Structures are given as structure tokens and as C-alpha cells.
Amino acid sequence: MNTRHVTSLVAAGAAIVMLLSGCGSTGTSNSSNASDSNIISVYGSEPAHPLFPGNTTEAGGGKVVDQLFAGLVTYDAKGGIHNEVADSITSSDNATHYVIKLKSGWKFTDGTPVTAHSFVNAWNYTANSANKQASASFFSTIEGYDDLQKPDVDPKATLSGLTVVDDNTIDVKLSQPDSAFPVKAGSHAYMPLPESAFKDPKKFGQYPVSNGPYKFVSWQHNHSIEMVKNPDYKGNRVAKNDGLNFKIYTSPDSAYADLRGGNLDFTNTIPDTALTSFQSDKSLKAYNEPGGNTLTFTIPEWLEHFGQNEEGNLRRQAISMSIDRKTVAEKIFHGTATPAVDFLAAPISAYSKELKGNEVLKYNPSKAKELWAKANAISPWSGEFGIAYNADGTAKNWVEAICNYIKNTLDIDAKSIPMSTSDEFLSNVDSGKMTSAYRSGWGPDYPSADNYLVQLYDSSSADGKGGNSGNYKNPEFDAMMDKALSAPSTEEADKYYQQGEEILLQDLPAIPLWNQNATAASTSAISGVAFDYGGGPVFTALTKKQ
């Protein structure tokens, strides 16, 4: 995912409260690329779900939702928080009670006002398990959340901790301290929705009404998503262009060919075939900067031999130590990725190269064989080991490379499993239907270790309620995350996050591989290319010479 401030990147209650108080295309061109228009055509992939912010957890839909909606806060390039629709967010009672004041005058693109009800109704809808929204876990610390997760919950049931005081005031009561609340309030899950979203959710997901820097125009499935500048937008991200056309591709190579041919203006997905040449291609402008994205692969708990037990942990550790991350980074990523040393990315304050147990992320074939043999002594291995990926992305070469390492080190049948489209792949991941390991990774929704750890590995994010698609559950890890959210300072919170990571390094619910740079390319006519704190492109900053 991608959204993106604070001088320190974990929400440490008092400092943040003070800061927030008071202040399938093949490249065919269309009319949106007309030379007399400042509409920018950019690389896109087909969203996995309708365009509901609370159900958007992947890049294809995330890029689009980011441009259409505006939340309580925004994040700058260094991860700093700035009020957007919020006028202030103040905390009391050890970060268990927040009062949110909204700015007046905001409107949705259908002309209706953005009010406290717009936020509270959206949050209730997302948190209620009957609505099957993938970001439900973002609300897990608000009073009443557990009641909304019951199998027979009324679809209209609401979070007891949310109260609309008046049109511009929201009172939030939490069931536990959550110092990260003001930070995650700018993520997709917390975006407001108009009344029309609840009257006809199916229609809204295809024709969203929003309040962000752009206004939705059309979604031609597997072809394009078009939007134009929103003249009524009142926030921090005013567009410097007239609109965006997300051209949907099933192959990054096709997009790159269109870019070189002048039929696409910008891409932030460089295909493997161009990684050695895109920075020296004189026909393009190239960009390669440190970013916040992580690359992993997940071995779900339900696979035979990979339960959350001694055998499963031994096998995960053996597989991890079978992989030469440094060589793959050099041979395949060509200076655009660095080997992982933990579960975070370098821009996040809790990131550390000194975690206890991080030797499982280092290439050690003899140790890998030893651990695999110990697992075989518990239960003999049989069958093949596969890693699934979407063939319309850039994973093919690195997935095949690590499968070869696993095969050669452990002497087992290991192979890559391509799935034709992101939509097919993500549908299987989200529904828990994967029958093999699968490529995974993360682009942050908000600048905090909470986003990488709680949203991906906490029990509250499992069972389809968040990003914990492998259904990892460890009460010891959960308790450490609770301590981090209760910490009075960033420094203390980071210690708990790091202790939680040391638990993850034993269990390896996902296997960290690399941290990816922010890479992109544009035609020579494009200027204003910039990246947010997580390495995502700032589409509102793009302009085009006429």
C-alpha cells in the first residue's frame, strides 16, 4: 500500500498530539494523452477490489484511492504528519481518548459536505466484519471492535467508541492505549465516505465519489482509470497537472515499451529486463532513490509441514538461510534493492541491523541443511515446495532465483508458480485459498513500525481482517505490539517493536528478502517527479511540457 511525516516515525503520543493540535492495456493511446492536455498517463494495474478505501490493500487500487480521497492527515517526504481535513487531533487518558476537530467547507465531488458523520460512518462500515473490508483491523483498538467481529454481527452495528459530537467533532474512545492512532488516521482505512457509498456500495465501488485532489471520471476494466483535477479540493496536495490516466497493463515490459515509444508518460514499475539500462537510456528520465517498500514471501500456516510449531519454524529458517540475497540483489536488481536485515525499511525509526536472531536472513547453506534435517526428524518431508506470484508484475526472475537456491541447498523439488494476473493472484491470497507459499511485500500506508508489524503480523489482522494473509498468530508477539502502542515515547516504543521483530525472526511468518528502492522513469516532457516517505510517486507533482 501507499500513503505516507513526524520527525520520528512512530506515533509517540504527546509529541504528535502537540503537532496536530490547532493548526490489460497494450499501450494504445486515447484522448487523455492529447498533446494539448496536461493529463499525465501513468502505469497502472487492475485493482483487486472495487474502489472502497477500506478494502484497498494492494498497489493497483492503492495508487488510485490515494489520489481520489483525502483523510484527516497527510504525510510529507520525510514522514512528517500534517493536518488535512482535521483541524486538530488531541489526546488524553494515556492515549485512550482522542477528540478530532474537522475543518469546515470540505465537499465531496457530488457537492455534499464532508462532516464528522462522513468519517464515522466510513469507519464503522470498514470495521464491521459483515462488510468484509480488508482493512478492518486498522480499527482494532477502538472500543466495540471485538463485537463487530462476531460471526452473526448486524451489518449496521457500529463501534461503541465512536461518537459524533457535532458536524465537525468526533469523540474516539479506545479499548487500549494507541499512540499510533494520529499517524494511521491518514491511511486508506480512515478516509471519509459520502452517503451514496452506503446506499449503493456496489455502484460506489465502480464510480467513487471522493474528496481528494482528483475527481473520478471512468474505469474501463483492464484498460484504464481516468481522473481529473478536483477544483473543490482544499488540502495539502493540490495537483499541478490537469488529471491522471492510469493505463492498465498486464506486463511491465509492455508499459516500458510504451514509455520509450511516447505512448506513456510515467512508470514507477521498471521491468527486470530494463534494470541494467534504464538509468543510462538517453531517451528517458530515470530515478533511483531509497524507499520504504519491502519484498518478502509468505509461507502460510495451513500448509503441511509449515504449522506454527517446531517443525514449521525449523523449515522456514532453513529455507530463509538457503537464499543468497546479496547475489540475487546484484544479479537481478542491479543496485535497486538491498538485502533485508529485519521486517522494516530504513526510513522507519525502529529499523535495526542489530536484531537478535537476524542470522536467519543470511546465506548459510550448511546451517540450512542442518535445520532441514532436524525438521525431517520430526516429520519426513514429502512433495514439492512452490512459490506463487503474479506474472503481470516483476517477480518472475527473483522468485525463480530463490527457488533454485532452495532446490540446490535443501535437495528438494522447489519451483515457481506463475498466476496470470494480479487480480487472480490477490483474490486467492485475500480469500486464504493459496496452496503454496507466495510472494508478498509491503508499501507503507503510514510512517510507523505499527504499519509493517501490527497490520501484517498481529492476530487482529488475521482471518481476512487485515494484511496478515498467512494467519500468523502469536500471543507473545501481540503483547509486545500492545506495549509499543502504550509507550510514552518513540524511543521506548521502538524497543518493543524491535523485541517483537525478534519473535518474528524465530517464527518467520513471512521471509524478508530485500528492501526496494523507489525506481521510476518518465519521458523527457515530464517534470516534477518526487517520492513520498515510503518511495511511492507523488502523482500530484507531475507536470508535462506542452
Image (tube, rainbow, N blue to C red):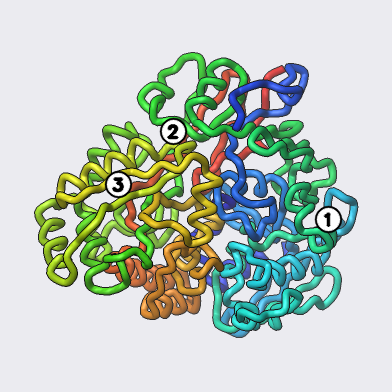
Up-down relation of residue 424 to residue 328 (above or below): below
Disc 1 + disc 2, Cβ < 8 Å: no
* Crowding near the residue tagged with mark 1, few <14, some 14–19, many ≥20 C-alpha atoms within 10 Å: many
Residue 145 appears in the rendering: no
Select label 3 or label 2 by which is in front.
3
**What residue occupies the far front of the structure in this picture?**
383
Up-down relation of residue 451 to residue 109 (above or below): below
The picture quadrant where one finds residue 13 is: bottom right
Q: Which residue is mark 2?
A: 288
Residue 8 pos. (x, y %): 49, 60
Q: Residue drawn at (32%, 32%), measured in percent from left and top?
A: 334
Give the camera-side residue of 372 and 121.
372
Residue 37 pos. (x, y %): 76, 23
Select label 3 or label 1 by which is in front.
3
Q: Residue drawn at (25%, 47%), measured in percent from left and top?
A: 414
Residue 103 appears in the rendering: yes
Q: Amino acid at mark 1?
A: Trp
The CA span between labels 3 and 1 is: 44 Å
Q: Amino acid at mark 2?
A: Asn
The CA span between labels 1 and 2 is: 36 Å
Q: Which residue is mark 1?
A: 106
Q: Residue drawn at (48%, 65%), measured in percent from left and top?
A: 450
Dot 3 lies on which element? Answer: strand
Q: Quadrant of the C terminus?
A: top right
* Crowding near the residue tagged with mark 3, few <14, some 14–19, many ≥20 C-alpha atoms within 10 Å: many
Residue 165 pos. (x, y %): 82, 78
Dot 1 lies on which element? Answer: loop
First along the sequence among labels 1 and 2: 1
Q: Amino acid at mark 3?
A: Pro
Q: Which residue is mark 3?
A: 339
Dot 2 lies on which element? Answer: strand
First along the sequence among labels 3 and 1: 1
